[in-house]
Image: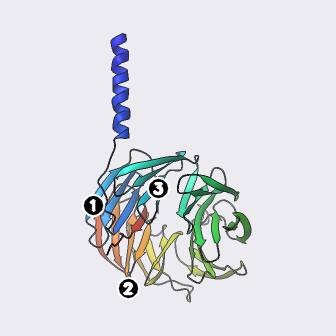
Amino acid sequence: MYKKIVFLLIALFLFVSSCQLQSYDHIPENKDVLISVNKKAGSLTFLQNDTLRKLSEWDLHRNVSGAVLIKNGREIVVYDHEDPYVDTYVLSKGKKQHSWKLGKGITNIITLHNDKLAVANGKKGTVQIVDFNGKIISTIKIGKTPISMIEDAKRGLLYVSDFDQNQIVVINLVNNKKLNSITVPLTTLGLFLTNDGERLLAGGHGNGENENDEVRIYSTKTMKQLSVLKVPLMPVNFFSNEDGVFAIAHGTNQIYKLDPTAQKQTQFIEVGSNPYAGVGDHHTAYATSYDLNKLYKINSQKMVVEKEISIGRGPFQLLLREGEKHE
């Protein structure tokens, strides 16, 4: 019995030690990298963004549904809806830095201009304002299921869509209080703010009976709908580059280049099944297929796929990290 206890203690010690010493390939601070957050694998894939050469694959040994870069891209924060802990990693060291307990239910995290994070929690129906040390500065009650968020840094505002209520909530980031709301359809998902801050684009998933095929454009001054763009089917995410604004039509596996002057959208390209993630860079767009574990590099001027590669299982989000340039 004594030997068995000693053996178990040694095994436990070795397990804990291995967890503490877990390290990954270093990602140099001067590298421009494209990062794929792989939900099925619980991993991060790091690619050189111009060639798509694989730099590293980090198996995080935890569930991951999203990530956000902080501190000018030197660190990455990863989270999962069912995990109460948020972990931060230093890319150049390849090591975990901190774990913050923010609670289960996190649906989204974005970086704010004032070195804070906005953390949406779908179980609590809140948005938390958190500093880069994991300290909760403020908690704002939103509704049922806050999910998509976008900041207007010039005006100090945060727009938050509530998936299960007919609203986009506007938060004043000066006092962290609700300022206003925009009436929208249920299951609104995906937000994009124009550069002048005057128009807010909102996508949506829809349900089994009424699948959404529209991107709605709202005035941030009047909080009223201005126009509707037909983007079949299920436009659930947006991104932009020098060629314009793009919508990911999850239901038809298409990436649309949006024309805000036309109701019917005609510029699109088809990618692999279940695209969720996309990001833009100069005249290039990157998109993924969640089912096929593929990444697509798209010429966004011609709207053609230039290259496709296999990446980690279940690519659910893409991040671009611009390397620090030292003279």
Q: Label 2 vs label 3: CA separation?
A: 32 Å
Residue at the disc numbered 2: 301
Q: Which of these two is toward me, 308 or 60? A: 60
Left-right relation of 150 to 225: left
Tell which circle, 1 or 3, labels the residue nearer the N-terminal end.
Answer: 1
Residue at disc 3, secondary structure? strand
Q: Quadrant of the N terminus?
A: top left
Residue at the disc numbered 1: 55
Q: Quadrant of the C terminus?
A: bottom left
Residue at image point 36% right, 21% down: 8
Q: Are marks 2 and 3 in contact (CB under 8 Å)?
A: no
Residue at disc 1, secondary structure? strand
Residue at the disc numbered 3: 77
Classify 288 as above or below 14: below
Residue depth check, mark 2 versus mark 1: number of the one nearer the observer: 1
User: Is residue 119 among what the camera can see?
Assistant: yes
